């Protein structure tokens, strides 16, 4: 009897399984980041609503002062960075936006060129 009972890999099957598992792990990691961001957003909304209500009821100085907006402002900056970490900096200005703008500028140049001909 062998000391280790290990079967050799079937090259075709192991490569396929590895690619499939790797794709699953990447998708799972993206999903976990997305869920984490949505939880962060939900907690941000709930806590800041609570703070606004608390400050509005208990504040003798009135509601419109920097202290009332400091937490949402600075936490919001952190939330923005979390958003950029999850969705990427190209969320707003991605490839499709660039392509659309390039086409728009090229069409505009073509019209101007036709007008001067």
Image (spheres, helix red, strand yellow):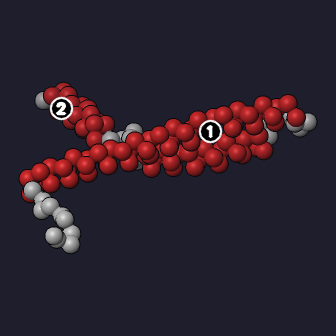
Q: Residue at x 81, y 34 (%)?
A: 54
Looking at the image, the residue that sits furthest to the right is 60
Residue 52, how many percent across, how many down? 75, 34
Quadrant containing the C terminus in the rendered view: top left
Q: Nearer the viewer, mark 2 or mark 1?
A: 1
Q: Are dots 2 and 1 in contact, CB under 8 Å?
A: no
* Residue toward you, 110 or 74: 74
**Can you say whether 90 is above or below 114 in the image?**
below
Residue 34, how many percent across, how many down? 44, 41
Q: Which residue is mark 1?
A: 43
Mark nearer the N terminus (2 vs 1):
1
**Can you say whether 79 is above or below 108 in the image?**
below
Residue 61, how many percent across, how many down? 89, 38
Is residue 87 visible from the viewing direction of this image?
no
Q: Residue at x 22, y 34 (%)?
A: 103
Q: Residue at x 82, y 32 (%)?
A: 56
Gap between marks 2 and 1 measured at Cα: 50 Å
Q: Which residue is mark 2?
A: 110
Q: Residue at x 32, y 44 (%)?
A: 27
Label 1: how many Cα within 10 Å (few below 14, some 14–19, many 20+): few
Q: Label for residue 113?
A: none
Quadrant containing the N terminus in the rendered view: bottom left
* Residue toward you, 20 or 51: 20
- Label 1: element kind: helix
């Amino acid at each position: 009897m062998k000391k280790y009972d290990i079967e050799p890999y079937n090259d075709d099957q192991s490569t396929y399984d590895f690619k499939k598992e790797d794709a699953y792990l990447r998708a799972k990691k993206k999903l976990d980041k997305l869920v984490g961001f949505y939880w962060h957003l939900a907690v941000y909304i709930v806590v800041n609503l609570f703070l606004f209500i608390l400050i509005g009821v208990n504040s003798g100085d009135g509601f419109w002062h920097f202290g009332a907006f400091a937490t949402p402002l600075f936490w919001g900056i952190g939330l923005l960075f979390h958003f950029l970490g999850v969705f990427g900096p190209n969320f707003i200005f991605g490839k499709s936006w660039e392509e659309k703008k390039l086409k728009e500028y090229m069409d505009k140049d073509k019209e101007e060129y036709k007008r001067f001909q």
